[in-house]
Amino acid sequence: MPALKHPLENIRVIDLGRHQAGPRCAQVLARMGAEVIKIERLGGEETRYHGPWVKKQSSYWVQYNSGKKSLAMDLRKEEGKEALRKLIKVSDILVQNFRPGTIEKMGFGYEELKKLNPRIIMVNVSAYGQFGPYKDQIGYDPIGQTMSGITMLTGEEGMPPIRTGVPIIDRITSLHAAIGCLAALHEREVSGLGQSMDVCLADTGYSMTEIPIAAYHGSGIKPKRGDSNSTAPPSGIYPCKEGWVLLSAGDQHHWYRVCNALDKPEWLEDPRFNTRPERAKNADIVNQALNELLATMTMDQAIAHFTKHDVVAAPVNDIPMAEADPHPWERRTMVEVDDFLAGTIAVSGDYWHFSRTPVNIGVTPKVGEHNDEILSEILGYSPEEIEEFKKNNVISEEHLYDEVEGAPDRT
């Protein structure tokens, strides 16, 4: 059997997702080498026209859709629905994140899908799930942060709740969905059958607060707010003379290194600090010593000092500093790819560094760029039928980029 170039080569995915969690799931599969066909509305999915911008290209859109093929097709028309039915018959996975019940109204619920293709795996991404007390409500990333308690763990006591600055719930939900796809593909090798999968943003939030919820459920322990781990100080963000630094010493042998870094050899045998619970009781003493030392250091000096003592230390970067760091570029976590609007654009790159089957980055498709290819080569439509589709506005390559103000070149 010939070797695969990419881990999911020969797997075909239909992406009906919009916004973030659904498209990101499909993009993860594309990175692994799956052929992902993005079916978007005529004119392009709305997030093509969401900033921030790199020239006239949406960096929002690119991060979730690079490496896919675009089929811009009107699924309200019967011809579009029939083309989708044909595509379902020759595909492995369908990803959708419409409000629960919508895909069924469109005629493409799982019961219909498995009649067309018993091997199809359907991924349903939503705010609150396909069942449960809130299933009919709509929502985006923040609902997973707020209802699960995340926003009341961040910030400081007495201050308003704080959301994270990036959509972590969408990101992690997309990974939950992608992991589920891999499991369903593996199970299908045994059963020969596909299945439907239900993942949601709210569940992701609860998966992130599982430890404090379990502690409160079992013992009534209510966690404190803040950036530090109150059970294992030092663990948090500390101010320096210039900038901020993250320090962490969760295990006791890490604590011994902190003692050396603070030039406090007497603390090595001090009963106030010889266990995690004792350290937690005396966190103010530890933090005072750290703050006094760090007040004499810049962030870079602090990192150098604590790293020399093998203590976990990391910079607290803003976005310009994070972009300038060599790590994401040497690791190919971020890479530059060609782009039809921006010239080149940075996209997320290698999440996994496989030793034999590298990931597939790919470029961002134009609206409807692959209409003809998909309809003719995959679905068997004739040139005349495709022209009829165009004439009847079933498919289109029209876009709205000329209306985008965009952004200037970086200076």
Image (cartoon, helix red, strand yellow):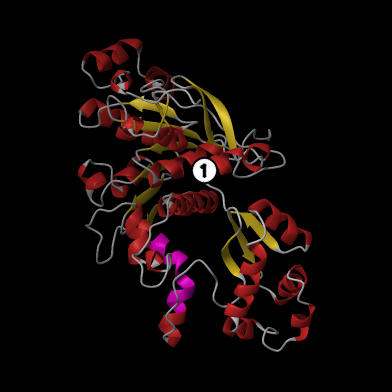
Residue that badge 1 annotates:
319
Amino acid, disc 1: Ile
**Residue lying at 46% horizontally and 75% vertically, measured from the top left:** 212
Q: Is residue 262 visible?
A: yes
What segment is highlighted magenta in the picture?
203-214
- Residue 144 percent location from the top left of the image: 36, 59
- Residue 40 percent across, percent down from the top left: 32, 31
- Residue 173 appears at what percent x and percent y? 43, 53
Residue 267, compared with residue 134, is above or below; it is below
Helix, strand or loop for the magenta stretch, by majority: helix
Q: Nearer the viewer, residue 329 or 354?
A: 329
Name the residue rendered at 44%, 32% in the picture: 62
Q: Is residue 233 visible?
A: no
- Crowding at mark 1 (Cα within 10 Å: few <14, some 14-19, many 20+): few
Q: In which image quadrant can residue 251 be found?
A: bottom right
275 or 13: nearer the viewer = 275
Q: Position of residue 365 (x, y in %)?
A: 44, 25
Q: Could you tell me which secondary element the residue under label 1 belongs to? A: helix
Whether 354 is drawn above or below 38: the answer is below
Left or right: residue 163 compared with residue 211: left
Magenta-colored stretch includes residue 189: no
Q: Quadrant where the N terminus lies?
A: top right
Q: Quadrant of residue 158?
A: bottom left
- In which quadrant of the rendered view does residue 250 lie? bottom right
